[in-house]
Amino acid sequence: MSYNGVCFFAYNNKDIDYVKLALLSALYVKKFMKNNNTCLITEEGDYNYLVKSRGEDLVDRAFDEVVFTTVKHKQNIRTHFDSPWSKFTSEFKNSNKHLINEYSPFDKTLLLDIDYFVRNDNLDYLFDSDTNVGMYQQAKNLKHETPFLYERYLNPVGIPMWWSTVVYFDKSDISEMFFDIWAHVADNYDFYKFLYKFPGALFRTDYCVSIAVHLMNGMNTGDIIHEIRDKQMVYMDQKDELVEVKSPTDWIFLANDRAEPWKDIATRNYYDNIHMMNKRSIDRNWQTMLEKLDV
Amino acid sequence: MDERLAKALEFSNYRSTVENQKRNLRSRVDSLQTITYNNGTFKADKSTISFVNTLINLDNTEIVVVDERNNPIEISDPKDFLTTLVEAYNGSMNEFLAESKKLAKARSIKKIMDW
């Protein structure tokens, strides 16, 4: 019987306590998924801080495995929004994400970003399938709108963007090839940025995986990479706000209007897995999200 | 602000919220109807159920059905497949009905949100 589970990368910076968010996200996996072994990939100092700040008992309940890395991350500054009216920049350490197939202790692995909250068992099917690599290619926000152009395509006439928020993989030759190409693109990011004409100074693993998918499909569209069954990843935009956690599966958000940012509508979401891009909003609701889980 | 205009704007906000809740609900139904069977992805909707049922009624004991990704999937036990489809369909419809009724009764944003 294979040993399956879910991995999280978390490296703290001075603005965001990533390990704290990973702990909560892992507890949601424990609550809602059947394949719920979990692994935290972090630095020893961040882990020690997590144990000290949250208690060993809670950390042990959240994570079955811990992998320490000592990678020196390249400087990568990311701009975050917390509502339309507040923004900040912080260091984003993601330059070793493609090494997940080396770090993962599992035979079949689901890699989740720490701001992705699982609230159903929809992703469990992947572990019972013969999928080599699976990700989302499409997304929608809390108002069911598609993302901006540069989060759908790498440029206005470019290849489709795949999301590295949720990456499922097994230990096959295909998945090994996928991570090799991802590593190659990451190592030659500026060249691929020029070639695929994608914007921005931020190193985005979404762009790396999108190019890897394109190359593996023979520089065409194809189905070598499995598109996750529910097709559209649901995300909360950085300008949205989580205003109430009624239960682990019943959350109320204020969804911001992209065209008229002074407007919000209340939206009540049940059961969807949600990529919660506003990390400060998670932090404000962290304690309630934990208490309602009742773990 | 003119009272009538204020009421109209409040109603407009309420309708926007209701419409988004309806989209949430349809999305939930869609998710509940999406099933995996023999490594294929299928939609447990009226047409899939009718099609599989027709093949069974014509005494097909093994069938091939094209899934949502246009891949042919071999089904060696069509009756078991039909049962899986019907269960997913019924589960989704029961939730759709119950939540739609709740939404229809909620005549304000506060009621929709249980505030």
Image (cartoon, grey):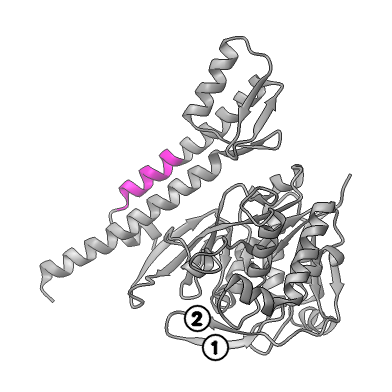
Amino acid at pointer 1: Phe
Q: Secondary structure at mark 1?
A: strand
Q: Residue at x 68, y 58 (%)?
A: A213
Mark 1 touches mark 2? (CB < 8 Å): yes
Q: Quick one: label 1, few (<14), some, or many (20+) residues within 10 Å?
A: few
Question: Which chain does the residue under circle 2 lie in?
Answer: A
Q: Nearer the viewer, residue B110 or A171?
A: A171
How far across and how far down the image is residue A223, in percent? 66, 47
Separation of marks 1 and 2 at Cα, in angstroms: 8 Å
Q: Are marks 1 and 2 on the same chain?
A: yes
The N terminus of chain A, quarter of image: top right
* Residue occupying the far right of the picture: A1
Q: Secondary structure at mark 2?
A: loop
Task: Look at the image and give the residue range highlighted in magenta.
Answer: B96-106
Magenta stretch encompasses residue B110: no
Disc number for residue B2: none
Question: Which chain does the residue under circle 1 lie in?
Answer: A
The C terminus of chain A, quarter of image: bottom right
How far across and how far down the image is residue B107, in percent? 28, 54
Q: Quadrant of residue A253?
A: bottom left
Disc number for residue A88: 1
Q: Nearer the viewer, residue A285 or A239?
A: A239
Q: Is residue A180 above or below residue A168?
A: below
Pointer 2 residue = A82
Q: Residue at x 48, y 27 (%)?
A: B47
* Residue occupying the far top of the picture: B59
Q: Residue at x 50, y 32 (%)?
A: B45
